[in-house]
């Protein structure tokens, strides 16, 4: 009888082929092959298409109304995907090399008449991070400086829309934003990253991506009570009611910076705490460090 012979050796995942009817006759399997009849099956049944470049070993099974095959396909689990994220450098193929550009960072900075850096604004929800980021971007724009803002919420609409607020996903969220911010800084742009980023370890990892001095950490030092009284998105109320779990400041910790470059402390004074005044404080730091010059 004509048929398709598949070598059988090692079992793994058993799968079924519905509609494979070979009658009451048992097909010989003693030679280590599973023989599938082709003359009657191929004419009126969907074709079996191999999804791999090679035939995978299967175990020998009894064939009756259905045939159970054992295919050796690796499973892509959520755990494996997360391990790939964490161990990205370790798993990177050895044949990937860095391609140098003929135009260097200093050339781009000379063109823009500014130095690229990352302004990383961190603090509790409701501390005013996004408001200060917008004020800073506008103030620098008025000075003829090119900026781009990576807002924590905005990034989750696209680049990080696949991430949750679990600890491991928060870490990945920060890692991705850090890598993007690094690219902006390399272009010569003043990149403003505005997000809670509650863990010191994650912020320090982003700092390590850039040359010394190019990561400017700005801490919005605003008490939890003030942030909760503002509650612009109603998130604290939901967290207190138990409708949001793992909310920073309520049932998940916020680790304040220990050695940040700029501290914007809430004093209760409307003039000194205005977004524009806070932005000017950051600009003074950038001017002193030479980031607003080519």
Image (spheres, rainbow, N blue to C red):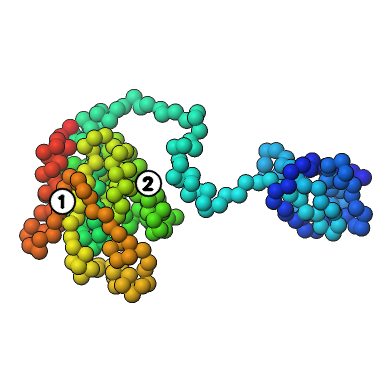
Q: Which residue appears at 77% of the width and 58% of the height?
A: 18
Residue 146 placement (x, y as % from top left): 22, 42
Does 116 sit left or right of 14 as displayed? left
Q: Which residue appears at 13% of the width and 56% of the height?
A: 265
Q: In this orientation, which residue lies closer to the viewer: 119 or 59?
A: 59
Do the residues under discs 1 and 2 have CB atoms within 8 angstroms? no
Q: Which quadrant would the C terminus be assigned to in this image?
A: top left
Q: Which residue appears at 44% of the width and 45% of the height?
A: 86
Could you give the CA–CA distance between mark 1 and mark 2, rounded to whole angstroms?
A: 25 Å
Q: Is residue 139 visible?
A: no
Residue 16 placement (x, y as % from top left): 75, 56
Q: Which residue is mark 1?
A: 263
Q: In this orientation, which residue lies closer to the viewer: 241 or 97?
A: 241
Secondary structure found at label 2: helix
Graded by Cα atoms within 10 Å as few (under 14), some (14 to 19) or many (20 or more), the crowding at tag 1 reads: some
Please tell me how many numbered marks the rendered image carries. 2
Q: Quarter-wise, where is residue 145 in the image?
A: top left
For marks 1 and 2 on the same chain, the one whose residue lies earlier in the sequence: 2
Residue 27 placement (x, y as % from top left): 89, 49
Q: Which residue appears at 44% of the width and 55% of the height?
A: 162
Residue 116 placement (x, y as % from top left): 24, 37
Give the number of the disc on residue 176. Answer: 2
Secondary structure found at label 1: strand
Q: Is residue 19 visible?
A: yes
Graded by Cα atoms within 10 Å as few (under 14), some (14 to 19) or many (20 or more), the crowding at tag 2 reads: some
In this view, the residue farthest toward the bottom is 241
Q: Which quadrant would the N terminus be assigned to in this image?
A: top right
Q: Quarter-wise, where is residue 6 in the image?
A: top right
* Mark in front: 1 vs 2: 1
Q: Is residue 255 above or below residue 236?
A: above
Q: In this orientation, which residue lies closer to the viewer: 17 or 115?
A: 17
């Amino acid at each position: 009888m004509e048929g398709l012979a598949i070598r059988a050796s090692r079992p793994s995942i058993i799968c079924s082929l519905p509609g494979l009817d070979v009658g009451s006759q048992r097909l010989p399997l003693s030679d280590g092959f599973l023989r599938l009849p082709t003359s009657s099956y191929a004419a009126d049944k969907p074709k079996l298409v191999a999804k791999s470049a090679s035939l995978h070993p299967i175990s020998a099974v009894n064939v009756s109304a259905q045939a159970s095959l054992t295919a050796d396909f690796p499973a892509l689990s959520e755990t494996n995907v997360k391990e790939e994220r964490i161990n990205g450098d370790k798993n990177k193929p050895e044949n990937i090399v860095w391609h140098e550009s003929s135009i260097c960072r200093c050339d781009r900075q000379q063109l823009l008449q500014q130095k690229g850096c990352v302004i990383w604004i961190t603090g509790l929800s409701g501390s005013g991070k996004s408001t200060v980021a917008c004020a800073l971007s506008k103030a620098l724009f008025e000075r003829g400086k090119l900026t781009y803002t990576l807002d924590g919420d905005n990034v989750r609409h696209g680049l990080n829309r696949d991430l949750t607020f679990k600890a491991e996903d928060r870490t990945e969220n920060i890692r991705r934003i850090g890598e993007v911010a690094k690219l902006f800084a390399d272009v010569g742009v003043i990149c403003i990253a505005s997000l809670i980023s509650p863990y010191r370890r994650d912020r320090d990892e982003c700092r390590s991506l850039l040359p010394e001095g190019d990561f400017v950490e700005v801490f919005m030092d605003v008490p939890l009570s003030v942030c909760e009284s503002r509650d612009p998105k109603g998130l604290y109320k939901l967290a207190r009611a138990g409708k949001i779990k793992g909310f920073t400041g309520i049932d998940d910790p916020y680790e304040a910076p220990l050695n940040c470059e700029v501290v914007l402390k809430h004093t209760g004074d409307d003039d000194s705490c205005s977004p524009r005044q806070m932005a000017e404080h950051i600009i003074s730091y950038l001017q002193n460090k030479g980031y607003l010059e080519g």
